[in-house]
Amino acid sequence: MKAVVLAGGKGSRLRPYTALIPKPLMPIGDHTIVEILLRQLARAGVTDVVMCVGHQAALIEAVVGEGSRYGLRISYQREDTPLGTVGPLRVIERDLPERFLVMNGDILSDLDFTALHRTGESTGSPLTVAVCERASKIDLGVLDLGPDGRVVSFREKPTYTFWVSMGIYAMSRGVLRFIPEGRPFGFDDLMHALLGAGEPVATFPFRGHWLDIGRSDDFAEAQDEFEKNRQRYLPE
């Protein structure tokens, strides 16, 4: 199996931490977040990883290295200008097999990457999105209005549950024709392009633990979660 790890962002929401340290190198326990991810990929049977880097690329390359310590072969693709979430895939197109995994480099999760890859193969879809449920509370009273503007129902501080993308995907080379060359193109753009073309987009529902370490609160939660459940993420 081959995986693409997206590690080119500036991590603006995690400042001031990321002023000096790129987000994939943020420490979680005695590891970096990307090291945990790379070890999980190797355990799942991934042999080759392409890391798409941009912001502080040299530091990431120096710390992560060529991958032998993780049981992987790691290569790098530098972005001179940011290309968004999936834009870098067109740059490395020639190096991609028929099916591969793609993920953000700042995720703490116990997702089964082998199962995700197999699901992508079995569905035949060009894109399979790992999804989990998240609850969002509205801290206000919510009114539903009828056509005449009168209130027809009321809920005080309701909670809504949504399926959300985890930033982890199983893809086929079929997605590449929807990604333009040489300009930024995000996952949202890809979703709209696939759905607009009538292409099937499959999902991999996940009910384990997942954290996208994008904010200071997420970083603190990830520290606590990893220390409490280290074996879940890095089994001996």
Image: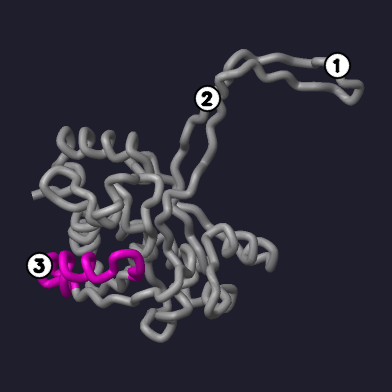
Picture coordinates of residue 216 (x, y %)?
A: 33, 38
Query: Is residue 162 shown left or right of residue 22?
Result: right
User: Is 236 part of what is drawn in magenta?
Assistant: no
Whichever of labels 2 and 1 marks the residue nearer the N terminus, that label is 2
**Residue type at numbered disc 1:** Arg
Q: As rendered, which of 11 and 70 lies closer to the eye?
A: 11
Q: Which residue is mark 1?
A: 150
Q: Within the image, what quadrant is residue 160 found in?
A: top right
Picture coordinates of residue 171 (x, y %)?
A: 45, 68
Q: Which residue is mark 2?
A: 137
Residues in magenta? 52-72
**Residue type at numbered disc 3:** Arg
Q: Residue furthest right?
A: 148
**Residue type at numbered disc 2:** Lys
Residue at point 46%, 47% (across, down): 131
- Which mark, by number, is residue 69? 3
Is 108 situated above or below 174? Answer: above
Distance, label 3 to label 1, CA atoms, is 65 Å
Query: Is residue 165 shown left or right of residue 224?
Result: right
Distance, label 2 to label 3, CA atoms, is 43 Å
